[in-house]
Image (cartoon, rainbow, N blue to C red):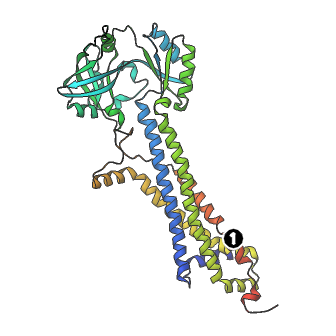
Amino acid sequence: MYRPLSLFIGLRYSNAKHKNKFVSFISIASILGIALGVAVLIVGLSAMNGFEKALRDQLLSVVPHGELEMVNGSFNDLQGTLKQVRSYPGILGVTPYITLNGLLQKDNQTKALQIRAISPDTESNVTQIEQYIKAGDWSLLAAGERSIILGKRVAEKLKVSVDDSLYLLLPQNQAGNRLKAPRSIRFKLVGLFEMGGQLDGALGFIHIEDAKQLLAMKNANAIAFKVDNVLDAQKIARGIAYRLSSYLYIKSWITSQGYLYQDIQMVKSLMYVILLLVVAVACFNIVSTLVMAVNEKRCDIAILKTMGASKWMLRLIFIVQGAFNGFVGCLLGAIFGTYIAVNLTQIIEKFEAVIGHKFLSGDIYFIDFLPSQVDYMQVLLIALIAFLMSVLSTVYPAWRASNIQPAQELGYSH
């Protein structure tokens, strides 16, 4: 099989043992440095991709993309308003709701909570909370039954389980200067949901008809909606609000959870810069390796020149040698990094079990596990960029090799 002479000699130099052991050490260090940089970059970006996917598929499957809430009172023409919102471009689904802030009580245990009074028939148009029901049944949330669905962490705090009764304490308006005792309403727990994050301990659901009765309201005072492009949620919410004649609070997931998305994007950008600098440092090792290899092979280069080797042939020999080290490093890093990234969640879970500590607490973060999603095009791009950086690092040593004078190296004078 025909191979160009520069490729043949370059690969032979790559596999040959060096007289100077330090050159061999630097060569191995350059390969391992590139491999480590590529692997860490793949793992880090896969983790950020996982957070982004968890935010989009998990958190935003429960948190409405956008919300419009009356400043005072409730909607006079709820069905007409729902129809207007539904007809706005980019809207996939709408549902009415009422928000209550109350205190849940069971025996001596209490828990402050946000209660969303929803219509189970239309809630699935906007969120998929029913997918996270782990005990009980979403269909048991019926009008007039005083039923409630809670997050698993709330139930653990109150020490209740499905079919248990508990009390919802709601504040009452003051009578003059006197404070009124909160109202106490008995509810039956019919379901538990578990997402593995903050919402498990901060959210509960009741039927919207029960909320209307408790608050003496004729209609819902808020509308939630789902959009086709989550990044346009705030713009769409504003557009809808300007069409309606009511005074409304305009909210979207971007105002409540958008900082998470921005943090993820910022970290991804920083990781690209920082970890590519790590690869760049490893590429400097390639420069060192080739400079020392050139010094070691000065006589060989001189002989090749006297045999008619051109400057570009000599340059290509050392470019091939450096590119080989870069290729091996990128390949090892891509394989190792992808393997770790694919199994990252399981690896971290086992490590957490060994040390007895969770890195992500569900009380603080929107998830309680470290997610990971491998983007294979991203892996290819990382490996390609690292390889190109390693090839560029060979230019100076290769150029230096091509300028060696045979007469000086072989002991002849002009």
Q: Position of residue 87 (x, y in %)?
A: 54, 17
Q: Position of residue 202 (x, y in %)?
A: 33, 30
Q: Position of residue 386 (x, y in %)?
A: 58, 60
Residue at 52% x, 66% y: name it.
Answer: 33
Front in this rendered view, residue 113 or 20: 113
User: Looking at this rendering, what residue extends furthest in the bottom direction?
Assistant: 412
User: Looking at this rendering, what residue extends furthest in the left direction?
Assistant: 107
Q: Position of residue 358 (x, y in %)?
A: 32, 48
Front in this rendered view, residue 143 or 1: 143
Residue designated by label 1: 396
Position of 241 relative to 288 (above/below): above
Q: Quadrant of the C terminus?
A: bottom right
Residue at 29% x, 20% y: name it.
Answer: 141
Front in this rendered view, residue 12 or 373: 373
Q: Is residue 128 visible?
A: yes
Position of 392 relative to 382 (above/below): below
Callout 1 secondary element:
helix
Horizontal placement of 119 versus 77: left or right?
A: left
Residue 219 sits in which quadrant? top left
Q: Residues within 10 Å of mark 1 (few under 14, many from 20)?
A: some
